[in-house]
Amino acid sequence: MRKILLSMMLALASLTTSYGQIWQQSSLWHDPFDIYAGPVLGGIASNLTEYDGKTMVSPYIGGFIQTYFNNHFGMSLEFAYTRQGSRDAWANFLSDEDLAVYDAEGNKVGSRARGPYEYRLDYINTIYKVRYYPIRYFDIFAGVLTGVHFNAKCELDGKSTDIIDQIHKRSAHVIGGVGYELNNLQIEAYYGFPLNKLAKTKKGRQALGSAKEHIILLTLGYRIKIY
């Protein structure tokens, strides 16, 4: 009787252990420190504060690398090109004095137009994301997007002016959003809150005031396991 009871207990323990191993394997959403990389495409919508303007929608082109720490946490690094700015923008925040144009002797000779302006700023961006997966395939993430512009233009009445020296070389946004993994595809939507103003010089501040860039992004990435 004791032998039978002991055998049953050993069999139950073995079954429980086997079931636990199977459950643990089946519940493993991500293998820790697996590395994925791939291209990412999408769109970015941007607008300037201060100005009364229309949202500019432009392509988002880049690539990413991503890893996981466990089922619930991961991180990614992304590089991308974007064009940001605003269309049909009116500088209604500027006073008549701000718009006044003077000659070398200090005499008022005219006024700058309030608009409509088009601002086009081209950036190379680096995006850092920390991800939390509350359930399988779905993640909530936060991070930082930093950009370095290599082209900056302001257009009025068909005339384009280079403003690259009037604005800060770098930009920074705090980002937050959601993502969904569908096989090898990764869909993301997120918002970027600006940390810095655009204008750097006195001339830049006369034109842009305290304007900042707000951004919304929707992207689709293709994940390839590389390690």
Image (cartoon, grey):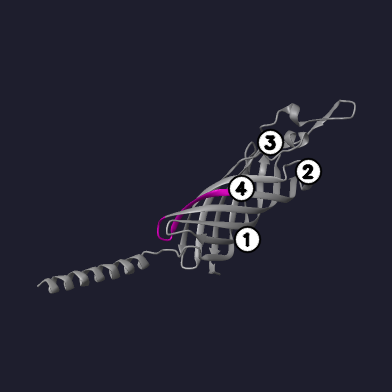
Mark 1 vs mark 2, CA separation in Å: 26 Å
Q: Dividing the picture into quarters, in which one does residue 116 lie?
A: top right
Q: In the rendering, at what x and y percent does residue 203 appear?
A: 78, 35
Using residue 66 as the reference point, say whether residue 158 is left or right of it: right
Q: Earlier in the sequence, mark 3 or mark 4?
A: 4
Q: Is residue 123 magenta?
A: no
Mark 1 vs mark 3, CA separation in Å: 33 Å
How many residues crowd around disc 2 within 10 Å: few (fewer than 14), some, or many (20 or more)?
A: some
Are the two marked residues, 2 and 4, in contact with CB atoms closer than 8 angstroms? no
- The vertical placement of 174 against 138, above or below, is above
Are the two marked residues, 3 and 4, in contact with CB atoms closer than 8 angstroms? no
Residue corresponding to mark 2:
165
Q: Earlier in the sequence, mark 3 or mark 2?
A: 3
Amino acid on which disc 2 is placed: Asp
Amino acid on which disc 1 is placed: Gly
Residue corresponding to mark 4:
46
Q: Is residue 143 magenta?
A: yes
Residue corresponding to mark 3:
91
| Residue found at the far front of this picture | 2
Mark 3 vs mark 2, CA separation in Å: 20 Å
Residue at 90% x, 26% y: name it: 105
Mark 2 vs mark 4, CA separation in Å: 21 Å
For numbered disc 2, what is the local secondary structure?
loop
How many residues crowd around disc 3 within 10 Å: few (fewer than 14), some, or many (20 or more)?
A: some
Residue corresponding to mark 1:
62
Amino acid on which disc 3 is placed: Ala
Amino acid on which disc 4 is placed: Ser
Q: Which residues are magenta?
A: 134-145
Q: In the rendering, at what x and y percent does residue 70 appear?
A: 44, 59
Q: Earlier in the sequence, mark 1 or mark 3?
A: 1
Mark 3 vs mark 4, CA separation in Å: 17 Å
